[in-house]
Image (cartoon, rainbow, N blue to C red):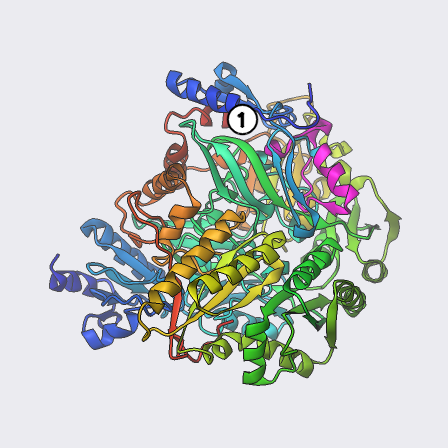
Amino acid sequence: MDRAQVIKQLQAIVPADAIISDPAGCRPYETDGLTAIRQQPWLVVLPETEAQVVAVVKLCAELRLPLVPRGAGTGLSGGARPHEQGILLGLSRMGKILELDPVRALARLEPGVRNLAISEAAAAHGLYYAPDPSSQIACSIGGNVAENSGGVHCLKYGLTVHNVTGVRVVMADGEVLELGGGSLDEPGLDLLALLCGSEGMLGIVTEVTVRLLPAPAVRQVLMAAFARVEDAAEAVSAVIADGIVPAGLEMMDQLAIAAAEDFVHAGYPRDAAAMLLCELDGVLAEVELDASRVQALFESCGATQVEHAVDPQAQARLWLGRKSAFPAVGRLAPDYYCMDGTIPRAELASVLNVIGDLSRKYGLRVANVFHAGDGNLHPLILYDANRDGELARAEAFGADILRACVVAGGTITGEHGVGVEKLDGMCVQFPPAALAQFDRVKAALDPDGILNPGKGIPTPSRCAEVGGMHVHGNRAPFAGLPRF
Amino acid sequence: MIRAGDSDDGARIVAAVEQAAAARKPLLVVGQGSKAERFAPPVAAARAERLSTLDHCGVLHYAPDELVLEARAGTPLAEIEALLARHHQVLPFEPPRLRGAGTLGGAVAAGLSGPARPWRGSIRDAVLGVELVNGLGERLRFGGRVVKNVAGYDLSRLQVGAFGAFGCLLSIAVRVLPAPTLTVTVHQSVTSEAALAQLAHLPARALPLTGTAFVDGRLSLRLAGAPRAVLAAAADLGGERVEGDLLWPALRDQQHDFFRPGDVRWRASLPPGTGALPGDAQALLEWGGAQRWYRAADAADAGNERLRGTDLAELGSAVRAAGGSLVPFAAVPWAQVSGPRAALQTRLRRAFDPHDLFSEAAG
């Protein structure tokens, strides 16, 4: 394919400054949040309107050119890795909030709008957008749709799929579909659900309508320390079994707690085997009632210490430790490897034991930080890439953790997506017939396979190796971006 | 015959699908048959071979402290709801028990949600995973028992409302919620315009609402949750207060007088906050006004296109102008599309069922 020819055809479709072909200009697009995976783009195109997106897609369809969509490029699985002979389509210039309806509590957005910007705009009306992935100051709503992003508060408020009411999407042939409309349902199959989490492989989203919620009247946080991990896991189950659905329920193990406390001095119990952070929100009467129930449950499960934070400063202090956990752990070793998997809550204690055994087997320390309420784990494997064989051991350790998640009845990815990093994990989680079913679905919507090829679904012959987010020298990709 | 308890009929179901695939013979999946009157099956269903799910029943996994329940498709809803009730939990989507019956598989396939839909989410929002047999006779699992799962395409949520077009559901895992401690209904006598105006402003207020209905000049609002919040909201809204009102099961199951057989003609699905439309005064308005049912002018005449209180064409225009859809009561919703979207749906269906075993009977 002649690149100059393609550039010429693109110049008829988008403004000249929307086409980037020089190496320096392309460099920021070489990688996403998974910086271990780099690929120089063949061409970068940055459309500003849906019409431009349609025209670019149609051109790619005509030329059978691979097309890799990219939101803010904060993804952690390499889903936005460019194709060496394709177009990297960045949606960041489509960043307008088109409409915010405070009465109907809806916001209509271009795909490049930052997740946090939605809540910031809605705040003036006492509303907010609930799904809050940790990268929310930078990640885009279009990317959130592609990954079906979650966050701390998805325990109570759901994933992106539960909070999006409609999209406009450009299909692989350039056709624009409007899914979901404004109603609670519409005639037709649920293509909107299919699109959420499809990692840019089934269509390019050009508009998203999201549901806004009234900001809770009150928020309170409880922090509890436990002498045994099993006690903390039991406490998590006890809270849910009691009929309480916290806004957030997070757990950290001893290594993570100590690292966070040394880093930000949040007042954490340094010597506790495990710590829980439980956020409750709602009207004052309900929150107060739930807080006292949660405290009692924590104590009945053996909590050695419980702190109940009512005022915003105390809450912020407690959250700071959890939100600083990744960089805090990153100070403990030259490199860390962040995994992402989900398991049923009941398996928490046993999977943590397995992780502990693996840590001894591989001779590498691991800190555990997770969204305990929904069983979404983020083990952080510490290693030194400069030491012979440690990287390989870290990767093998990570692969074993993901295998353990699948064995425990969970999944290889709770929120980061498959991208390229977890293609091998897909082989562990799904039998060949299921992978073939995924392939046929893809073929039905993108027969020429031009949308984000090589991502998400492994080819049948692929061997098993799992991966994660590498961090070298405690400099995470997007170092200014919170990761927790 | 409704089988209680635990029975695994998976092997027979797979074999039946394999045989149908080999013979290119269409299949009609039937649970308790509770949807048969509600949705008019296409003519093709008459020559389809019936595939019963009733012997594939039983709860496979229920963890109250994980808010997850997984059951075989033929499990009666009544059995599931009784089990959940013993643990003070509920199916958040309140599936209708049409004709007093229904299985979990049927609920998911039909994709109907009850009065709590805008506040507790739809069935699709609650589905975590499915096992199904596709049109190739392959037994496949998608999703699982956990909410946070982004591995692969979301083929489990895709099943909701598909009327089995992708294959026969064998089992479904759903998220359940704690049962509310107190449920109270308030009733107000108002016009449909006043009701809709009030309903339009509800989303931005933090009220513990789980249902709204306007019919025959009366607006009913169901509040559920912690007693203090519920009673405060009831006082705030005003009106006659009733605890444990049977209005809601009657609406859920379409047993309410409004749904006298033959009477209801059309269903509108509208953006929340949509104002008054022609004929609303004689209609049943649910879901904060987002779901509206319209009756025929003359119940005796099956082909009658006149609606009570309005003209069909006028209503259709108004619904479309509001950004909603108006669909005949008995029509299978997923098939009511045309053009590129319909073509795409056909390709997608055939990705599961290349010989169209399941679609003829599904609509």
Count of picture labels: 1
Position of B338 compared to B272: left or right?
left
Q: Secondary structure at mark 1?
A: helix
Where's residue B158, x and y in %? 49, 42
Taking the spot 72% from the left edge, 57% from the top edge, the residue there is: A238
Is A323 situated above or below B33? Answer: below
Q: Residues within 10 Å of mark 1 (few under 14, many from 20)?
A: some
Where's residue B74, x and y in %? 62, 28
Quadrant in the rendering for residue A394: bottom left
Residue range of the region highlighted in magenta in the rendering = B78-107
- Residue B273 part of the magenta segment: no
Instruction: Choose between B190 and B73: the one closer to the eye.
Output: B73
Is B341 situated above or below B236? Answer: above
Q: Which residue is mark 1?
A: B10
Instruction: Choose between B150 and B211: the one closer to the eye.
Output: B150
Q: Chain of mark 1?
A: B
Quadrant in the rendering for residue A162: bottom right
Where's residue B82, x and y in %? 76, 37
Instruction: Choose between A227 and B100: the one closer to the eye.
Output: A227
Taking the spot 54% from the left edge, 64% from the top edge, the residue there is: A151
Is B165 situated above or below A343? Answer: above
Looking at the image, can residue A203 be seen?
Answer: no
- The quadrant in which the N terminus of chain A is found is bottom left
Where's residue A412, x and y in %? 46, 53
Position of B315 compared to A310: left or right?
left
Position of A461 compared to A222: left or right?
left
Looking at the image, can residue A324 be seen?
Answer: yes
